């Protein structure tokens, strides 16, 4: 929850506002307390949107629909006024996390929990359907978890079955990845009925049991296409639940069970409070409940101080102007949040050209794997971050000192969630870098988002659509080229070598990423190749014999391993060698590492890999960094610099530069909300590449400059440089050889 802004009302229709739960382009959702003391989530629509008759009618319909739903597993409406100048709707407040947040923090849920979850959501949908209503947006973000069971929320696009939609005829209603095929088909808008909610419920159950969306992630078009035309990925769904989930996800609405039948097959929808949740979640819910219930009544949002108060507290005009410019990037109202969240620190009174003696200190958190499967990458990020802070602190003109606080998440989602909560509570931490896996990013991102902490990664790529709240003013910043492009360096070598047939080994153990890499490779090679074939290996087997036999039968000139496992990539390389394939082979950076080299052995020789990281020892611009890194960590003059070390260095220096821009000559403190604001749209030239985002949240990387090529030579990866130039060099080398 965020503080009220000066422009916010103090109360609405007898509800005392306590803070902001969220905001969007259409309005604001407040945490409020009724005259009787009950907590409520109050949605207020902005007047300019309420002036639109169509929008007001949709809001009026939402209020009417919500008031008709009275089941136990939906949030109850406490009051509304669709006719007010700024319409509002108040519902009971549920302090627990959403299902999306719970899975992000704790991973896939156990089968008994999912059974109880499904039974109670099916019960809620049964009540809706019997009332002649269709929810149309059942998804993890619309399911809140309470001690006694889930609550289904957000009836903004719900409507009566068979009613004429108030949305445009070409609009897709629902959330891609959780909507039914008939919702995805624009022409089928009239077909959307209760079976569409059952399909969405099946998606939710699959997500809860596996931690993955059954139709993957990626662009909206890709997700919708898979929803309509492909079978869901249900690997990991417990056998006892698999038939029911499969039935819910039938493409034909007529083949799906009803919500009532789902409830019956899952068992009782009742049970003792708290018993349905796995360890950890009841404590989280209790903690949030205690925190909210203990909130004091907020001060009025319009404050008129007395004369003596004004004299004591009013800043000088110069300081006020500097303060305003420093936080303007955080958006309207950011000043209030900045003042609330700013970190106390020394403000110094030094004069002349040098910094004051008592500079404030701001901390960069490093959340990374120091003891798990990617501990080498985690150690590199820690070392790079510490060297960056020491370099920054050596500057005579620095406006503050920079500290680094490192925490080991062990490469585990539960550890990542705990680290994120620790950093979120430490008000001295202004930003966090690190994380080495998709799972640890997802486990931590929601906490950082809620705490307005910038969370930057250099060693892992994910789909931002998997995160909530990452579109308008995101906290998560991925300082690397999008991972779907990681195949480009390898396919570029294939192109310059004249490959006519390309085979992709799609490793199902990599989930949706393997599908995207295969699809990306097909798009790249289809214009220049006679054929691009994709050969799948199931996640549950380590035996590559059959899939390699298929690959060789396609007579490829180039083979791309589409997966993320070093071990499985090594097994693939070994089997290709055993079966006599001696053509071009390659993969992406996730599969390159010590385990790949040890498992593949001699078969690794000559393999190419596309990466987002460089070997700074071979980059002229990073010469000084390389020397300082080796000296700082007592390495020999020829020792390799760990991968991701210079990238972590750049990430910390980027954040520090953006923070420095917030500090005026008056030595203003830095605040999380302001740091998040200046990290929204920026460019930064690091030692080895350029980083940045534009106002539309689009990465401003040039893939042809920020992707690199490695080749395994004599049992070790050798950095070849920026991939286009390196590919041309490889063409010359290949022709000579």
Image (cartoon, helix red, strand yellow):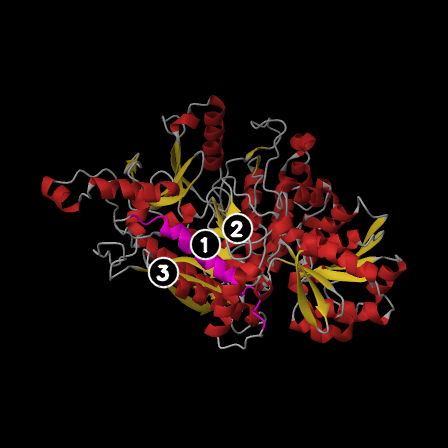
Give the residues in magenta: 640-664
Q: Which mark is residue 110?
A: none
Return the x and y of residue 115 as percentages of the image width and height: 59, 58
Q: Nearer the viewer, residue 408 or 188?
A: 408
Viewer-nearest of labels 3 and 2?
A: 3
Q: Is residue 254 above or below residue 388?
A: above
Q: Which mark is residue 654?
A: 1
Q: Secondary structure at mark 3?
A: loop
- Earlier-in-chain disc, 3 versus 1: 3
Q: Which residue is mark 2?
A: 691
Q: Residues within 10 Å of mark 3 (few under 14, many from 20)?
A: few
User: In 3D space, how far apart are the residues under numbered discs 3 and 2 (Cα atoms)?
Assistant: 22 Å
Q: Which residue is mark 3?
A: 395
Return the x and y of residue 407 as percentages of the image width and height: 44, 68
Q: Nearer the viewer, residue 498 or 66?
A: 498
Residue at 32% in and 46% down:
337
- Earlier-in-chain disc, 3 versus 2: 3
Q: Say if residue 33 shows up in the picture.
A: no
Residue at 89% in and 59% down:
553
Q: Secondary structure at mark 1?
A: helix
Q: Is residue 711 above or below residue 81?
A: below
Q: Which of the 4 image quarters holds residue 45?
A: top left
Does residue 501 show up magenta in the picture? no
Q: Residues within 10 Å of mark 2 (few under 14, many from 20)?
A: many
C-beta proximity under 8 Å, tags 2 and 1: yes
Does residue 644 show up magenta in the picture? yes
Left-right relation of 172 to 44: right
């Amino acid at each position: 929850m965020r503080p009220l802004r000066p422009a916010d009302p103090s109360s609405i229709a007898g509800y005392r506002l306590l803070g902001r739960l969220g905001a969007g382009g259409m309005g604001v959702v407040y945490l409020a307390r009724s005259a009787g003391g009950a907590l409520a989530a109050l949605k207020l629509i902005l007047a300019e949107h309420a002036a639109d008759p169509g929008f007001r009618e949709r809001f009026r319909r939402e209020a009417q629909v919500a008031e008709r739903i009275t089941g136990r597993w939906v949030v109850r409406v406490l009051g509304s006024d669709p006719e007010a100048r700024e319409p509002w709707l108040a519902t009971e407040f549920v302090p627990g996390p959403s299902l999306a947040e719970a899975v992000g923090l704790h991973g896939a849920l156990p089968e008994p929990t999912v059974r109880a979850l499904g039974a109670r959501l099916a019960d809620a949908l049964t009540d809706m359907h019997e009332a002649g209503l269709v929810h149309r947006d059942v998804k993890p973000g619309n399911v809140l978890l309470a001690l006694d069971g889930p609550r289904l929320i957000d009836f903004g696009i719900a409507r009566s079955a068979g009613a004429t939609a108030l949305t445009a005829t070409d609009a897709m209603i629902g959330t891609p990845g959780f909507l039914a095929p008939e919702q995805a088909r624009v022409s089928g808008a009239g077909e959307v009925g209760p079976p569409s909610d059952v399909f969405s419920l099946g998606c939710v159950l699959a997500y809860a049991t596996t931690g993955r969306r059954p139709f993957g992630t990626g662009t909206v078009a890709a997700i919708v296409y898979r929803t309509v035309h492909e079978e869901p990925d249900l690997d990991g769904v417990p056998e006892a639940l698999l038939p029911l989930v499969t039935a819910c996800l039938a493409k034909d609405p007529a083949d799906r069970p009803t919500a009532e039948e789902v409830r019956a097959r899952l068992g009782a929808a009742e049970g003792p409070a708290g018993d349905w949740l796995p360890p950890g979640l009841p404590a989280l819910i209790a903690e949030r409940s205690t925190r909210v219930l203990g909130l004091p009544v907020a001060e009025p949002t319009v404050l008129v101080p007395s004369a003596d108060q004004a004299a004591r507290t009013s800043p000088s005009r110069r300081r006020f102007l500097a303060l305003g410019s420093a936080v303007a990037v955080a958006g309207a109202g950011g000043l209030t949040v900045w003042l609330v969240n700013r970190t106390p620190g020394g403000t110094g009174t030094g004069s002349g050209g040098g910094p004051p003696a008592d500079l404030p200190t701001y901390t960069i958190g490093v959340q990374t794997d120091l003891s798990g499967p990617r501990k080498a990458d985690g150690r590199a990020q820690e070392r790079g971050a510490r060297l960056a802070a020491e370099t920054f602190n050596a500057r005579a003109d620095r406006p503050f000192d920079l500290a680094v606080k490192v925490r080991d998440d062990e490469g585990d989602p539960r550890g990542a969630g705990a680290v994120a909560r620790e950093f979120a509570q430490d008000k001295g931490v202004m930003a966090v870098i690190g994380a080495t896996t998709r799972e640890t990013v997802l486990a931590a991102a929601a906490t950082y988002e809620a705490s307005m902490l910038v969370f930057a990664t250099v060693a892992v790529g994910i789909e931002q659509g998997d995160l909530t709240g990452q579109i308008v003013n995101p906290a998560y910043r991925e300082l690397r080229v999008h991972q779907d492009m990681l195949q480009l360096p390898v396919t570029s070598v294939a192109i310059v070598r004249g490959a006519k047939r390309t085979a992709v080994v799609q490793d199902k153990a990599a989930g949706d990423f393997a599908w995207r890499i295969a699809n990306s490779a097909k798009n790249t090679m289809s214009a220049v190749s006679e054929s691009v074939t994709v050969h799948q290996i199931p996640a549950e087997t380590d035996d590559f014999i059959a899939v390699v036999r298929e690959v060789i039968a396609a007579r490829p000139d180039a083979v791309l391993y589409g997966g993320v496992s070093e071990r499985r990539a090594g097994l693939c390389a070994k089997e290709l060698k055993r079966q006599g394939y001696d053509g071009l082979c390659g993969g992406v950076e996730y599969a390159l590492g010590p385990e790949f080299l040890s498992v593949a052995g001699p078969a690794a020789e000559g393999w190419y890999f596309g990466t987002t990281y460089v070997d700074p020892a071979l980059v002229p611009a990073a010469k000084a960094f390389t020397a300082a890194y080796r000296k700082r960590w007592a390495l020999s003059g020829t020792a390799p610099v760990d991968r991701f070390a210079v990238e972590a260095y750049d990430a910390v220096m980027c954040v520090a530069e953006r923070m420095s821009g917030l500090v005026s000559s008056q030595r203003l403190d830095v605040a999380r909300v302001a740091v998040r604001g200046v990290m929204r749209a920026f460019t930064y030239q690091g030692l080895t590449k350029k980083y940045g985002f534009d106002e539309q949240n689009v990465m401003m990387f040039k893939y042809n400059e920020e992707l690199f090529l490695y080749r395994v030579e004599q049992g070790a990866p050798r950095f070849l440089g920026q991939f286009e130039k390196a590919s041309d060099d490889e063409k010359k080398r290949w022709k000579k050889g």
